[in-house]
Amino acid sequence: MTDNIERIVIGGGCFWCIEAVYKRIKGVTSTRPGYAGGVAENPDYKQVCTGETGHAEVVEICYDKTFISSGAILEIFWRAHDPTTINRQGNDVGSQYRSIILYADENQKELAEISLKDLIDAGTHKNLPVTQILPLETFWPAEAYHKDYFKSNRGQSYCQLVIEPKLHKLLLMED
């Protein structure tokens, strides 16, 4: 990676949703759905969906810091999901859907903690956030069919009923 490209791994429910959000953000250079925060080696989707591996569905986001700040990336994260629900986003239930920020270094950890404190101080949520802030140990890329899932499956009911409304709400999609 070049000096201007930063990488962060986050999870806020289904990785299809999070990836669809960040694909529309100027300065984001790449996204990659995957699994992190668990104990199994090289997990697959079926294993993660059982909740037994401990992994969360996450997205690796690479972005150009000359176009968008780390703070802005985290601000979008807070708006793109409900950080106050434990192991749940809407109808998606299970530990794989938890709110999580996985930091690569102490600077990212500090930025995530400051961002979380700012969110709490702003009082935008009735309940306190339950987001985990943990070191990134291993990122396991998801199966290829998860990449750009929304773009490839716009007619699928999950995309129409969950992802499209989220993108409209965040003003990231035109009618």
Image: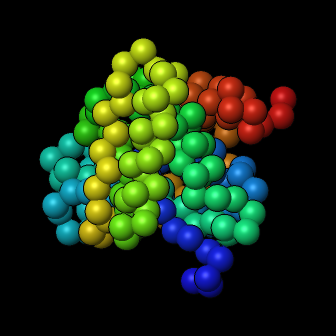
Q: Left of 98 or right of it: where is 159?
A: right
Q: Residue at x 75, y 63 (%)?
A: 67
Q: Left of 92 or right of it: where is 66?
A: right
Residue 163 versus residue 62 in the image, above or below: above
Residue 147 versus residue 77 in the image, above or below: below
**Which corner quadrant holds the C terminus?**
top right
As rendered, which of 175 and 103 lies closer to the eye? 103
Residue 16 shows up from this direction: no
Quadrant of the rendered image containing residue 28: bottom right
Q: Position of residue 148 (x, y in %)?
A: 61, 55
Q: Residue at x 35, y 25 (%)?
A: 128
**Which corner quadrant holds the N terminus?**
bottom right
Q: Residue at x 37, y 19 (%)?
A: 127
Residue 52 shows up from this direction: yes
Q: Position of residue 15 (x, y in %)?
A: 47, 47
Residue 7 versus residue 83 in the image, above or below: below
Name the residue furthest bottom: 2
Q: Left of 166 or right of it: where is 168?
A: right
As rendered, which of 63 and 138 lies closer to the eye? 63
Name the residue furthest top: 126
Q: Position of residue 149 (x, y in %)?
A: 58, 50
Q: Residue at x 43, y 30 (%)?
A: 120
Q: Left of 11 or right of it: where is 62?
A: right
